[in-house]
Amino acid sequence: MDAILVTGLFALTCFVVIEGLFRRRTEKYLAQRVSEIAQQLGVVARTNEIMSDQVNYLSNINVNNRLEDVEADISVLGTVVRELAEAVAEVEEAQATQAMAPPPAPEPAPAAPSNVAPIKSSFSAEENADEDEEDVPISILQDALAEGRMRQYLQPIVTLPHRRALGYDLVPKISQPGGKLLNASEFLPQTDLTGTISELEQMLVRQAANIIHRSNITGEPTSLFVPISYCLLNDTDACERLIELVRSNRAVTASLFLMMDEERYAGLNENQRAMLAQFVRIGVGICLNKVRSLRLNFQDLYARGIKYVKADTQRFIESPQSYSDLHNADVADFVKRYDVGLIMDNVVQEEQILMLLDDKIPFAQGEHIAPPSPVRPDLLGEQQKVQSSAY
């Protein structure tokens, strides 16, 4: 019995020792595997971070805009190559024609100075007559403002080809007895030292803000293009009051555009540009009217708040090289690259609209599309309704 007990105890002791050794080895193995899995999880986490960064980078890339830029560049490059080939062909044709032409005849004797002088003097007289033409008297505008005879008309700017309204030009007119209306060219002088033009432009901006506000209330939001000049920008106090007025209604700032002739905009001094920049900061857009050329730095113009430019339709169709070196069909895409809208003004016939559609022009305006019409009574203030009914 003692031997059996000793043997059983020894066997039990050996089993416990061996089981402890196996358990320790298993725990060590499991700890090693857990450490390896933790390292792999760390690698996977870092890989996920890298992939997340790459996905975010790819998602932030605007592929469509880049493709549009590339397509526009290719289109412009193709146009340049085509024009270059045409120019080379014309030069070669001219050289061939000159080589085949007979020798030129002797030049006639120069005309006598007495025959040239009268022609030159006649042209000079015509130029001096144009330069010396009397300017419109400022008293016409002063009397109209004092008597409340200013009228506001709206002329639409439409999208092509659907002809939906993009916005409206605010066109000031003067009501005369008998129902006659004076256009801006008939009552606005070239220069003004009395502050009357500034007073008119302040009134136009205020009325435009009221019309935009009322159109938003009626559920028919619209944009207005208000003509201004350096006369308003010279009046610092008036500009600050207008800025405060427009800033009080954010819905108005997004729909209000100040319109200025491109030639006058190019001649603004630093103070006038700074005042115009204050309007841009609160969200008011700028439209350049009567642009002399489309060879402009549109990227710089957009940075200054220029949202639209207006060009003459007839000149764009009949003399495109005076506007741009690009083909007419490429001009709109080139301008659009810089988020600037191109508006063709003074459309007078349907054939011009068809040609603008062929050239992918996005916006148009003119008497043929729609002439200026009076502002709707529900968009006018009470004082303006009374004045309108009086005449």
Image (cartoon, grey):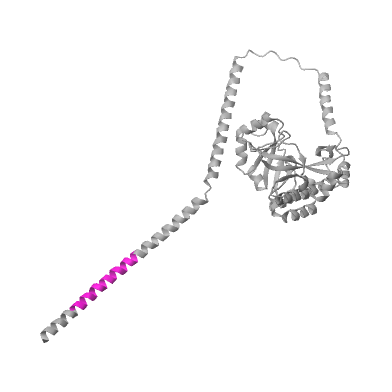
Give the extent of the magenta segment.
Answer: 14-36
Image coords of residue 101 (percent x, y): 62, 14
Q: Which of the pair 279/117 is nearer the observer?
A: 279
Rendered-image quadrant of the N terminus: bottom left
Residue 50 in which image quadrant: bottom left
Residue 24 counted in the magenta span: yes
Image coords of residue 174 (percent x, y): 84, 41
Residue 158 counted in the magenta span: no
**117 is higher (above) or lower (below) than 151:** above
Which residue sits at x=80%, y=54%?
237
Query: Main SS of the magenta segment?
Result: helix
Image coords of residue 77 (percent x, y): 56, 35
**246 is higher (above) or lower (below) than 314:** below
Image coords of residue 207 (percent x, y): 78, 49
Q: Which of the pair 103/329 is nearer the observer?
A: 329
Which residue sits at x=83%, y=28%?
126
